[in-house]
Image: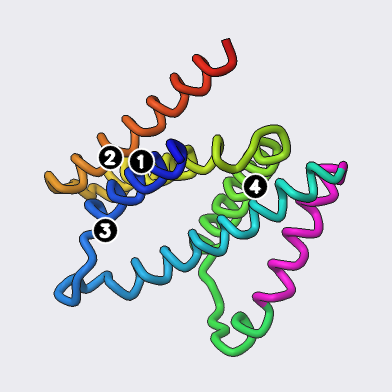
Amino acid sequence: FVQIIGVFCAMFGSVLIIKPGFANPQMLSSLVGLLGGMGAGLAYTFVRKLGSMGEDGSRIIFWFSLFSCVICIPFIITDFRPMTAGQGLLLIGAGCSACVGQVGITKAYLYAPAKEISVYDYTQVLFAAVLGFVFLKQVPDVYSLVGYVIIIGVAFWNFQRQKKIQN
């Protein structure tokens, strides 16, 4: 129950960052992102189940990635546009970063229950904000800053709580 409250608090922090509403021009993108987050949550529940059944993490990562690539093929074919060299390099960087993230999060879900790991998934919002500020000069508003503080606070609270339970 306490874990669920933590996840809902982190979701509330995300809502402050996203600021949903029909006046928000990024609303569709936000909804797609939410749908992606829900899909990722379901996927990592399956990863945890596979790990508890003794499945090797490397095999999970391989099949997870292969299946994702195969599923994306129709979307790539129907909306194909050639990339510039710069876009290609950025895509390679994104792929390498996603690979590191995929390996890390899969290992985390193999060794700990989803309820203990899920709140840390929200830290990707923080990394995106910092990188957006540094590289894209995107300045967050007050609501976003409050959302970031809530997410960091919930993750830290969960970390301290888990440490206390283990001792």
Residue on which disc 1 sits? 126
Q: Earlier in the sequence, mark 3 or mark 4?
A: 3
Taking depth in this image into account, of 50 and 78 the one nearest to the observer is 50
> Circle 1 — which element?
helix
Residue type, label 1? Leu
Q: Residue furthest top?
A: 167
Please say if 73 is above or below 119.
below
Q: Position of residue 80 (x, y in %)?
A: 57, 84
Q: Residue at x 36, y 48 (%)?
A: 8
The stretch of residues the image draws in magenta is 54-72
Which mark, residue 102?
4
User: Distance from label 2 to label 4 (Cα)?
Assistant: 23 Å
Whether pointer 1 and pointer 3 mark residues with C-beta atoms closer than 8 Å, the reply is: no
| Res 135 quadrant in image | top left
Residue type, label 2? Tyr
Q: Position of residue 30 (x, y in %)?
A: 34, 66
Whether pointer 2 and pointer 1 mark residues with C-beta atoms closer than 8 Å, the reply is: yes
Q: Counting other residues with Cα less than 10 Å from the Cα at mark 1, is it few (<14), some (14-19), or many (20 or more)?
A: some
Query: Which marked residue is nearer to the observer: mark 2 or mark 4?
Result: 2
Residue on which disc 2 sits? 148
Q: Position of residue 40 (x, y in %)?
A: 57, 58
Taking depth in this image into account, of 113 and 83 the one nearest to the observer is 113
Q: Residue furthest front?
A: 1
User: Distance from label 1 to label 3 (Cα)?
Assistant: 12 Å
Residue on which disc 3 sits? 18
Q: Main secondary structure of the magenta part?
A: helix
Please say if 111 is above or below 18.
above
